[in-house]
């Protein structure tokens, strides 16, 4: 039997496993759905969170070192396009991270996993940020003028 290692090469995927990541993604959106201060980011999402829970689980599985299941469905791992329709500023970014922090806590993730994920999550969330202030910009009237 191979012994489970927790050395510097252990990935979050190895520590959480497929089911742990699915539970995390599901809990994440349940937190977002129930936290009053997250209402403005919850409102950006479809009323049924089933699909986005599955997509987040697929993305995190791959991102945490597991098989490329998100790539298999989407053909890319780029998160810019899926977030383009939404104005995501520092407030939205930080609320997303708060929901993730609570989801990690509520799913009983170990300190080791939480420490491993803290900075990388911050980094991705900052990359997803596409606005200075989270206020949707009015469309350029010239775009309307030229149809
Ligand atoms: C670590 C940062 C983040 C990750 C890993 C992440 C991941 C994802 C993924 C995998 C999807 C599904 C995309 C698809 O359909 O292929 C998604 C959708 C979405 N994300 Fe994020 N996201 C992050 C940050 C944020 C932030 C800061 C916001 C701000 C509110 C946000 C709002 C949304 C919205 C509104 C959708 C679309 C949901 C829908 O279609 O109903 N995300 N995100």
Image: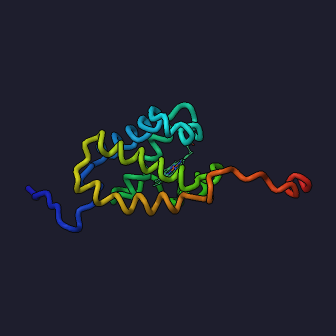
Task: Pick whichever, 53 or 74, lies toward us.
Answer: 53
At 22% across and 56% down in the image, what residue appears? Answer: 112
At 39% across and 62% down in the image, what residue appears? Answer: 120
Q: Residue at the far left: name it.
A: 1
- Residue 6 horizontal side relative to residue 79, left or right: left
Is 80 placed above or below 55 here? below
Residue 50 appears in view: no
- Residue 43 horizontal side relative to residue 110, left or right: right
Task: Pick whichever, 37 or 11, lies toward us.
Answer: 37
Q: Residue at the far right: name it.
A: 145
Is 46 placed above or below 138 here? above
Q: How is the image coloured?
A: rainbow
Task: Pick whichever, 71 or 85, lies toward us.
Answer: 85
Residue 40 pos. (x, y %): 57, 40
At 22% across and 50% down in the image, what residue appears? Answer: 110
**Figure quadrant of the N terminus:** bottom left
Is 123 placed above or below 102 here? below
Residue 25 appears in view: yes
Residue 27 pos. (x, y %): 37, 38
Residue 92 pos. (x, y %): 54, 49
Q: Residue at the far bottom: name it.
A: 8
Residue 75 pos. (x, y %): 53, 57
At 62% across and 52% down in the image, what residue appears? Answer: 134
Is 56 placed above or below 119 here? above
Could you tell me how many numbered marks the image carries? 0
Tell me where residue 103 sits by quadrant.
top left
């Amino acid at each position: 039997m191979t012994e489970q290692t927790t050395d510097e090469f252990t990935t979050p995927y190895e520590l959480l496993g497929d089911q742990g990541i699915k539970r995390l993604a599901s809990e994440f959106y349940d937190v977002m759905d129930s936290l009053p201060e997250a209402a403005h980011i919850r409102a950006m999402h479809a009323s049924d969170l089933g699909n986005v829970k599955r997509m987040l689980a697929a993305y995190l599985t791959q991102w945490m070192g597991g098989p490329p299941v998100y790539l298999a469905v989407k053909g890319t791992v780029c998160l810019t396009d899926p977030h383009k329709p939404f104005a995501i500023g520092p407030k939205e970014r930080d609320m997303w991270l708060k929901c993730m922090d609570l989801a990690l806590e509520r799913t009983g993730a170990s300190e080791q996993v939480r420490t491993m994920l803290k900075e990388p999550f911050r980094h991705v969330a900052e990359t997803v940020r596409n606005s200075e202030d989270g206020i949707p910009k009015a469309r350029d009237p010239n775009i309307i003028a030229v149809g």
